[in-house]
Image: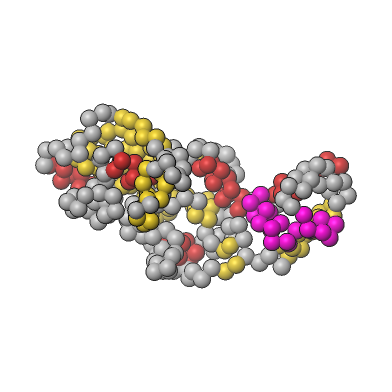
Amino acid sequence: MEQFTFVVTEKEENERIDKFLANKDENWSRTLVQNWIKDGVVSVNEKSVKANYKCQIGDVITVSVPEPEELDVKPEPMELDIYYEDEDVIVVNKPRGMVVHPAPGHTSGTLVNGLLYHCKDLSGINGVLRPGIVHRIDKDTSGLLMVAKNDYAHESLANQLMEKRVERRYKAIVHGVIPHDHATIDAPIGRDPKDRQKMTVTKTNSKEAVTHFHVLERFSDYTYIECRLETGRTHQIRVHMKYIGFPLAGDPKYGPKKTLPIHGQALHAGVLGFEHPRTKEFLKFEASLPEEFEKILQMLRNDR
């Protein structure tokens, strides 16, 4: 356990303690500091305080930084398709069929296992040693994912997602022929009360969800579209497209049983754009369609 001591100056008077400490080290996020305060590892003049405590001149603030908890996830060598990497961020192209995070029944072979092996410099996120997965992609969805290498990058990327400043575009094949060229689906998503494994459009315990899409190509029974996510709810595109009557092809959870010969939903996270946490430059990446997806499109074109 490492200990840090700070004395509040005149300039810092009346500053909230969580903000005060978050400014002392770029890897200390306000969320992390608030967790420390709750856990009692932060003291002011040898007394514990709340996160909204206003600093006074001469206050002696002590932080006993706890050791990050080790997660029982083993690094595994695997071929990762890395599109970009520096000291703060990795952009990786996830193949279809790979789980992002370890979970019961999926403790190995996940993207996190591969990242732990690949990156020796991944720091703890909010006090837990795990790669900074900022957003996820479903197991059977392929495409681009950004990963933070430190708390500073994690907070920046998470804030950009929250403020809807990250560009995320997906290619999808859906059942049915969509008559209009583009549309916006603005419908809140929450857990399906009839099936807890599913999400659904509902007003009960739900969160705002907005998907924009436009048609790229029409076939006799299917449509090829591009979706732009404004929010990032679990299964958002899959739930929204089902909601308007055009479920994703191959989707075992939300689509019809009779579908295209594809393993899982025909969905690919093809474009990812975000502001680099440190340089503030807007970075944009594009991953071409997986071979399986291309073959399905070719089959549909030949059947027209």
Would residue 267 be found to the left or right of residue 275 on screen?
left
Residue 141 appears in the figure? yes
User: Residue 95 at x, y = what percent?
Assistant: 34, 56
Residue furthest left as drawn: 303
Q: Residue at x 33, y 34 (%)?
A: 213
Would residue 261 be found to the left or right of residue 80 on screen?
left
- Scheme of colours in the image: secondary structure
Q: Residue at x 53, y 62 (%)?
A: 130
Q: Residue at x 66, y 49 (%)?
A: 30
Seen from the viewer's position, the closer of residues 249 and 119 is 249
The vertical placement of 189 against 128, above or below, is above
Residue 286 appears in the figure? no
Q: Please state the total of marks drawn on the protein image.
A: 0
Q: Quadrant of the N terminus?
A: bottom right
Seen from the viewer's position, the closer of residues 31 and 199 is 199
Q: Residue at x 25, y 39 (%)?
A: 245
Seen from the viewer's position, the closer of residues 198 and 156 is 198
Residue furthest right as drawn: 58
Would residue 42 be found to the left or right of residue 184 on screen?
right
Which residues are the magenta region? 30-49
User: Residue 259 at x, y = what percent?
Assistant: 18, 50
User: Residue 287 at x, y = what percent?
Assistant: 36, 46
The vertical placement of 109 against 144, above or below, is below
